[in-house]
Image (cartoon, rainbow, N blue to C red):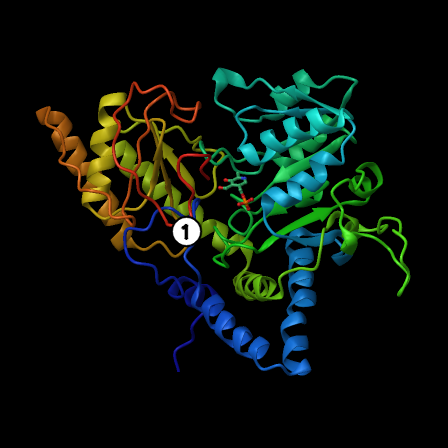
């Protein structure tokens, strides 16, 4: 009998249509997750206590797997509806000064500013980054720490540039200040030093392939000691059975939850974490890095400038073509059935471990077509958006969310679960 390694069966489990390069926006659900959904839905429909308990039992399983992957004790792990909910638990609980780049995904920046306005217990201090690119480097952080800084917040992988932060090096420069990490764009696909962080938040609907609602957050002992559980709900409070009073906050990480978790969602998360644990993050990370290198090579072959640093990235590779090329490339991607996110002049491509050669060929064909059109000075005719195609352009500068309108206004597409027009992932 032929031996199939865990990695091979993991890679084989990717069954999204060829051309999908938008894992940073949404990860098509894995077959194991889809099977889990059906099985658990049946159990929850049976009305049998044993079935309900069986589904609820996935919480312990998921918590254990998260603790293993985050390298922390299980009682530091909580379930959250999403990354943003976890980050809000941390940010609203802070006092003192929070050092934060204004170019972070708004999950962090909006929560921090709202918390500052509402509570007055913390202040946001804007971290300047070299060339305004938003790369949160240890040097930038070191240079801008003050005696007032109590916490630093950043993304493990930046959603726009794909920059991969070095958590260990950031920890070395911040001393014992709190380190709050938005890990949603890297969890599961990069071997990160989570132990260096105090709060790590993520969600499974991108790289874990487990769908929305599968958020989680880890709170270290220092985080639990220094953060007030301001947004805590009844599940985060201690109460005597049958008592009517409001009990004190839970002494552990559970203080930072609102209500009971969605057990169907947690079951999906458990199933995807199990798959990940079986194959191992280093093996997945190596495959993801390999796919990213292929994309870098294609960009180089067709002379498309790349924004993502080649020595610090995970699965996101962002192209930064000239204003006139951006529309041409977006149209060519759509024509070749490549799904990506294009915004403010940046074209974000994100490949997963299971992204196969057929998808990379489609990308190569699209970039070749765009390069040909560029050489001839011709536009590429854009296909109309169908809702499952490739590209959006909203013009404007790279980092302003694309409001200014000096770029082409093109097509509005993307996975259906992505809200457009407000703030995109
Ligand atoms: C870096 C980053 N943080 C947070 C979010 C939002 O995550 P969630 O939907 O889990 O709250 C996104 C979504 O794309 C993101 O890219």
194 lies above or below 241: above
For the image, the number of numbered tags is 1
Left or right of 415 in this view: 326 = left
Residue drawn at (78%, 19%) of the image: 148
| Name of the residue lying farthest toward the front | 244
Residue drawn at (68%, 76%) of the image: 53
Q: CB of residue at label 1: within 8 Å of ligand 1?
A: no
Which residue in the structure is indicated by mark 1? Answer: 352
22 lies above or below 69: above
Could you say where residue 181 lies in the image, as x and y percent from the top left? 64, 38
Q: Residues within 10 Å of mark 1 (few under 14, many from 20)?
A: many
- Pick the residue in front: 406 or 204: 406
Task: Answer with the quarter of the image where residue 380 lies.
Answer: top left
Could you say where residue 29 lies in the image, as x and y percent from the top left? 44, 60
Left or right of 77 in this view: 163 = left
- Pick the residue in front: 282 or 126: 126
Residue drawn at (79%, 18%) of the image: 147
Residue drawn at (86%, 50%) of the image: 251
Quarter in which the N terminus is drawn: bottom left
Could you say where residue 68 lies in the image, as x and y percent from the top left? 67, 58
Left or right of 336 in this view: 254 = right
- Pick the residue in front: 211 or 63: 211
Left or right of 95 in this view: 312 = left
Task: Answer with the quarter of the image where residue 140 lies.
Answer: top right
């Amino acid at each position: 009998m032929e031996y199939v390694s865990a990695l091979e069966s993991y890679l084989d489990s990717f069954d999204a249509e060829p051309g999908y390069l938008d894992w940073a926006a949404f990860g098509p659900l894995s077959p194991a997750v889809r099977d889990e959904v059906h099985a658990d839905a049946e159990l929850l429909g049976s009305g049998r206590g044993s079935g309900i308990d069986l589904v609820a039992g996935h919480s312990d399983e998921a918590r254990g797997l998260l603790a293993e992957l985050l390298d922390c004790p299980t009682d530091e792990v909580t379930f959250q509806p999403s990354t943003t909910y976890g980050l809000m638990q941390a940010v609203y609980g802070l006092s003192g000064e929070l050092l934060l780049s204004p170019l972070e995904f708004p999950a962090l920046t909006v929560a921090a500013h709202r918390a500052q306005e509402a509570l007055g217990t913390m202040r946001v201090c804007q971290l300047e980054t070299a060339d305004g690119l938003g790369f949160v480097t240890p040097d930038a952080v070191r240079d801008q720490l003050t005696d007032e800084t109590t916490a630093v917040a950043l993304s493990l992988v930046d959603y726009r540039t794909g920059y991969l932060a070095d958590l260990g090096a950031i920890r070395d420069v911040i001393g014992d200040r709190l380190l709050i990490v938005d890990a949603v764009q890297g969890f599961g696909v990069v071997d990160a030093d989570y132990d260096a962080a105090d709060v790590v938040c993520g969600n499974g609907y991108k790289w874990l392939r487990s769908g929305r609602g599968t958020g989680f957050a880890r709170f270290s002992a220092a985080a639990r000691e220094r953060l007030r559980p301001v947004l805590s709900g009844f599940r985060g409070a201690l109460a005597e059975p049958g008592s009517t009073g409001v009990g004190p906050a839970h002494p552990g990480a559970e203080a930072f939850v609102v209500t009971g978790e969605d057990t169907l969602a947690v079951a999906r998360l458990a199933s995807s974490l199990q798959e990940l644990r079986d194959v191992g993050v280093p093996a997945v990370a190596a495959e993801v890095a390999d796919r990213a290198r292929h994309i870098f090579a294609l960009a180089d072959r067709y002379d498309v400038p790349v924004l993502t640093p080649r020595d610090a990235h995970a699965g996101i590779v962002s192209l930064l073509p000239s204003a006139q090329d951006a529309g041409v490339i977006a149209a060519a991607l759509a024509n070749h059935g490549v799904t990506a996110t294009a915004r403010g002049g940046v074209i974000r491509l994100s490949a997963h471990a299971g992204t196969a050669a057929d998808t990379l060929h489609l990308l190569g064909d699209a970039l070749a077509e765009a390069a040909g059109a560029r050489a001839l000075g011709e536009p590429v005719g854009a296909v109309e958006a169908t809702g499952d195609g490739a590209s959006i352009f909203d013009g404007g500068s790279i980092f302003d969310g694309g409001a200014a309108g000096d770029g082409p206004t093109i097509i509005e597409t993307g996975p259906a679960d992505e809200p457009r027009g407000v703030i995109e992932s």
